[in-house]
Image: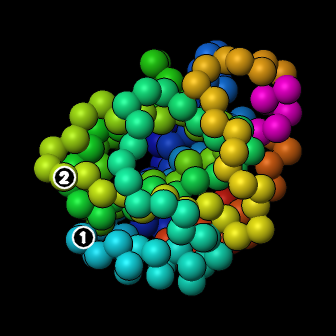
Amino acid sequence: MHEHRLDGAELIFLPDGVTIPNNPRLPVLLHRGAVAPGDPDGAEALFRRHGWLPAWRNGIFDWHHYHSNAHEALAIVTGTVQVQLGGEAGVRVELAAGDVVVLPAGTGHRNLGAEGPLLVVGAYPQGSAPPNQMNEGSEGGDRVRRTIAGTPDPGRDPVSGEAYPLR
């Protein structure tokens, strides 16, 4: 696992987590201070402008999970949350109101604890398959890994609007 910075975003590359596959090619993108805290409508408008469709407002599950057939953007609108990315051996990041994290298909994530009321806006790339394949571990094995590898890259980053993945 290693991190880089590019165009204001942190890029986090996660290795195969055995029970959580993560994404073999695409990094997690972490945009700090990308949306106005307390403004879920503004976060949704930003996502829509860049071709990502807001799908829900809620929190983050407190168990490891990932979507094998969809990329996901999470905007933290209120609160602060510790999130573990990549499974049990993954990296822990603190996300605060205003931050956006972009999770490539297969990226495990879970809520390790929040401070204050947590509100998250979740979005998926326009034209992608519905994020209906939520997995909790290594079930599916090679089939799941083929699904992850076959998930088309989003056209644009949901925050900057630049080509995705950021180069």
* For residue 166, above or below residue 160: above
Return the x and y of residue 48 as percentages of the image width and height: 57, 79
Residue under label 2:
117
Q: Which of the two marks, 2 or 1, is nearer to us in this view?
A: 2
Residue 37: which disc?
1
- Tell how many labels: 2
Q: Residue at x 48, y 60 (%)?
A: 56
* Residue 146 visible in the snapshot: yes
* For residue 36, above or below residue 18: below
Name the amino acid type tagged 1.
Pro
Return the x and y of residue 162 as percentages of the image width and height: 62, 75
Nearer-the-camera pick, 81 or 61: 61
- Is 73 one of the magenta-colored residues? no
- The 10 Å Cα crowd at callout 2, few under 14, some 14 to 19, many 20 or more, is few
* For residue 165, above or below residue 1: below
Nearer-the-camera pick, 31 or 167: 31
Q: Quadrant of the C terminus?
A: bottom right
CA gap between label 2 and label 1 equals: 12 Å
Name the amino acid type tagged 2.
Pro
- The 10 Å Cα crowd at callout 1, few under 14, some 14 to 19, many 20 or more, is some
Return the x and y of residue 135 as percentages of the image width and height: 63, 30
State left or right for residue 92 relative to residue 78. Answer: right
Q: Secondary structure at mark 1?
A: loop
Q: Residue at x 67, y 49 (%)?
A: 131
